[in-house]
Image: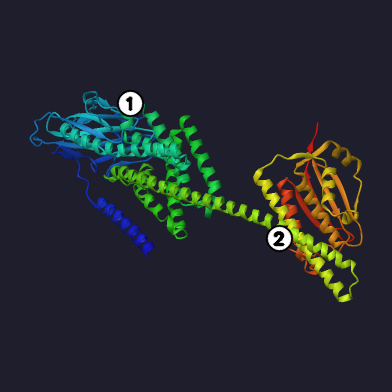
Amino acid sequence: MKRSAFWLLGLCMAACALTAQAMSASSPLPLPLPVTALKAPLAGHMSMWFDEAGTATWQQARTHTFVPVEGNINLGYQTGVLWVRMQVQRAESLSGQTPGTDWLLEVPPAFLDEVTLWIEPSVNLVQGQAVQEPPSQQAGAAVHPDLRPLWHRNSVFMVKLPEAGLYTLWLRVQSDNVKSVTPVLWQPKALAQSTQIKTMVVGLFHGVFICITLTALILGLTVGTPIFLMCAGFFFLLGLNLFIADGWLGLLFFPGRPHLADTLSASCLALISPLFVSIFSQLLQVKNHLPRFLGWYLRIVWVAGLLAVGLLFAGRFEQLAPYVNMLAMTQIVLIFVLALWVVPREPSLRWVLLALIPLVLPGMLRLARNAGLDMFINWLDVSLLAGITLHAMLLLFFVARHVGNSYKSNLQAKIQLVAAATQLAEQRDFVALLSHEFRSSIEILDGALSNLKRELLDGVSSAQVGRMARAVKRIRYVLSYCLDDARLTDLKSAQRPYLPLAASDIIKESFLQLNQEDGNRVKRLDADPASKALLDRARVLGDLPMLGAALKNLLDNALKYDPSGPVHLSVEAHDAQVIFTVRDHGPGLEDKERGRLFDRFMRGQQHLHLPGAGLGLPLALKIAHQHGGDIDIFNAAGGGAVAELTLPLVTQK
C-alpha cells in the first residue's frame, strides 16, 4: 500500500510538471514588457543568442538573430558567452512615480563571473545609418557602488529610463559556472524590502544550520563517536556550499573573486558526496547486507571526491563542474534506492527515509537545474534551504538515536560479558574443587582395586574388577583434562610472560606427565644434522607445563591406538619452526572422522572400548594455538597415523 502511494505521488508530480510546461509553451510571449509596477519580472520577455566562441562585440551581437525564450534562461555548464535581449516599454506614468526614476535590474545568481549591460533606446534610423554603442555597465558578483548600504547577493544594475518609450536591454553573461539568467526590474524601495525579507529568512535558516553543525561537532568531540564528526564535516561543507552558491559568502569575503568562490563551492560538493554515503551507509547498516559492495564503492567515491578537489584547485573548474554535479546527483539517488531496498529487510530503519525525503526532491531539482534542465521554480532555492535544514535536524536526531542504541547494546554486551566471566570463574573453581575431591576418592578406589587384583578371584569377579579399573582410569582421564583446560584458560586470561624453552625441555616435560610404563614404549628418533644445529641455538617461547601437556596428549593418543608396537617421536626444525612428529602403527584414521578429530568428546565409533574422554586432542590444539602453533593429524604411508605439533622458533644470538 505504501509503495503504491509512493509511485502514485511521483506520477502526479510528473503529470503536474508536464502540464505546467505545456501551458507555458502554449502561452504567447508578451514582448515588450510594459514597466508599470514596482516589480517587473522579465521571464518570458527575453530572447537569446549563445556565442560559443565568446569573442563577439556588442555591434556584432546586435546583428545576430536572437531566439525567443519562453521563461527564464538556463544553459547549465556550457563554454561560451550568453547574450540576452530584453525590450521594455516605459509608460508616461509609473504608478505615481515621476519620469526619470531609476530602476534596478537584478540578475541572479551572484556567482556569475562577468555580467555587462547596455541600454539602447529605440530610435528610428535612416537606412544604412550606423548605430552608436551605448555606454556599458558591469556588475559581476559585487554590489553597485551606489548601493553599498544595501547588502545584496545578486548582480545589480542601475537602469535609467529617462522618458516614455521603448528600450532594449542587452545583457552579456560570461561565466564558467551555471549560465542561468532570471532578471527582474525593481524600484529601489521595493528591492530593499525584498532583500530585507530574503536576508531575514535566509539568516534564520543559516543560523539554525550553524547551530546544528556546532552541536554535531561538540557531540563528536565529547562522545568520541566518528559518525558525529562525519556529520559535523558534512553539515559544514553543505552549509559552506549553500552560503557560496547563494552569494552571501562571496559578497562578504570574496568580492571580485568569483573564480575562487566557484572553486570552493564545487570542492565542497565533491567532498559532500563521500561523507553523505559514509553516514547513511552506517545508518542503513549496508555493511550487514552488502559488505563487499560498500567497501569498494566507498573507496571509489572518496578517491573521486579527493581527485576532483585537487583538479578543481588546479584550474579545471569548467571541465569538472558538470561531473561534480552528476556525482552528487548519483549519490542522492543511490542512497535513496538503498534505503528503499534495506527498509523491507530492516523495518526498524524506516525512519532513515524520513531524513532523506526533505533533501531528495529539492536537492535533485536544484542539481538538475544547475546541469541545464529547464526547471525554473520560484520557490526552489527557499525550499532547498528549508529542506536541507530539516534534513540536518532529522539526521542529527537519528544519528544520536543510532549512537545511543549502539551504546546501550555495547553496555549490555559488556554486562553480559562480565556476568559470563564471573560465572565461568565460579564454574572453574567448582570444577577444580570437584576434581580434587574426586581424585581423592579415585585414589582410594584405585588402591582397593589394586589390592583386589592380587587376590585369587574367580573369572567373573576378575572381569568385574577389570571393568571397574577401566572405569576408574576413564574418570581419571576426564578429571585430568578438565584441570588442564582450566589451567589453559587461566594462562590466557593472565597473559603470563612465556619463557624460552628448548625442544628437549618440552619432550622431557611430556615424558614426566606420562606414566612410566607408557613412557618406556616411546622411541625417540635422532634429528638430522641441520635440524639439530638449529635446535641447539633456537628456542620456543611458551609455558612448559602446557606445551608438555600438548605433546603428552599426542603421545598418549598414539599409545592407546598402538598397544603393541613402539611409538616414534622425532623433532625437526626448519623455516623458523620446530615440528614434533608422533608416529604410530595403529589402525589409522577413518575418512568420515578426520574432519571432527578436534571436536570435544569426539571418539571413534570402533574404539569406544579404549580409555579416554575425547578431550585430549581439543586441549592440545588449544595449547598450540595459544602459542602461535598448530596441530595436523593424517594417515601415514604403510598404516598408522602421524600427528605433527608445529611451534614457532626464536633464534638466540
Q: Residues within 10 Å of mark 2 (few under 14, many from 20)?
A: some
| Res 376 quadrant in image | top left
Q: Nearer the viewer, residue 433 or 273?
A: 433
Q: Which residue is mark 2?
A: 600
- At mark 2, the secondary structure is loop
Q: Amino acid at mark 2?
A: Arg
**In percent of the image, x 21 and y 26: which residue is there?**
149
Residue 24 tag number: none
Up the image or down, 379 lies above or below 60; here it is: below
Residue 594 left/right relative to 461: left
Residue 99 at x, y = what percent? Answer: 10, 30
Quarter of the picture containing the N terminus is bottom left
| Res 427 quadrant in image | bottom right
**In percent of the image, x 44 and y 36: which residue is there?**
221
Q: Which residue is mark 1?
A: 255
Residue 450 at x, y = what percent? Answer: 85, 64
